[in-house]
Amino acid sequence: MNKWMDFFFPRHCPICDAALLPGERICAPCGKIPQIVARPHCEKCGKAVKEGEVYCFDCLRNPRAFDRGFSLYEYKSIHDSVATYKNMGRPEYGEYYGAKMAEFFKDELERLKADVLIPIPLHPAKEKKRGYNQALILAEEISKATRIPVLKDYLIRPKRTKNQKSLGRKDRQNNMKKAFQLHGNDVKLETVILVDDIYTTGNTIGAAAAVLKSVGVEHVYFISLATGRGL
């Protein structure tokens, strides 16, 4: 059935957006474009750092509510792809990328023994306009491969924040204050993995992690599709 659906409603390559043949998830030449985050990594947020460095500049000077994070690709290598995924109605990009995240971080995800995956939520108005939450699609694909359940709507975003990309460093921090709330806390969790598409300064993930820690979640990790380079 899926192959017939792919034939009549072809998927699109997440890099060049060309229509794909049934069964394909990315063009062969485009498969070489996304760049895996280079080693060594920041031991806190997972950004690439210089040889001999343990933490990136951001993590050295800012306290982090999360325990540790992992990102798959250098953001600059898939910048246009992520923008199309989020803004041009291409949820199949998330299906491809989520599967790649699960494949690459299989060992780390198993080692963390997480209770659940929690996608970073969108404000309801923004999700309605977009038609889907890109972080949720990534989380669902990771869940299929790892069998770690997705806990949707446990964390909500009642505050309609501004686009982080358009703000300076301090404004980004202020923008995320009180951005997240719990939608009931009757589920007791010990270890959580947050899922998002992009990790930049850590303010979004940090704000979400702080809310979870405030209700007794012992360990909060994150996994993101892409990140910038450590300073």
Image (spheres, grey):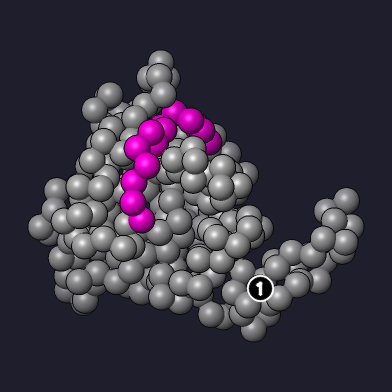
**Residue in view at x 44 percent, y 47 percent:** 195
- Closest to the observer: 168 or 62? 168
Q: Is residue 65 left or right of residue 116?
A: left
In the picture shown, does residue 160 fall above or below 34?
A: above
> In which image quadrant can residue 191 be found?
top left
Figure quadrant of the C terminus: bottom left
Badge 1 density bin: few <14, some 14–19, many ≥20, Cα 10 Å: some
Disc 1 secondary structure class: loop
In the picture shown, does residue 85 fall above or below 79?
A: above
Give the residue pinned by disc 1. Answer: 17
Task: Give yes or no for residue 11 being in the magenta stretch.
Answer: no
In the picture shown, does residue 225 fall above or below 148?
A: below
* Residue 118 in view: yes
Residue 177 in percent (x, y) is at 23, 40
The magenta stretch is 150-163
Residue 21 in percent (x, y) is at 81, 71
> In which image quadrant can residue 187 be found?
top left
**Residue in view at x 31 percent, y 63 percent:** 166
In the picture shown, does residue 141 fall above or below 212?
A: below
**Residue in view at x 58 percent, y 39 percent:** 147
Identified by mark 1, the residue type is Asp
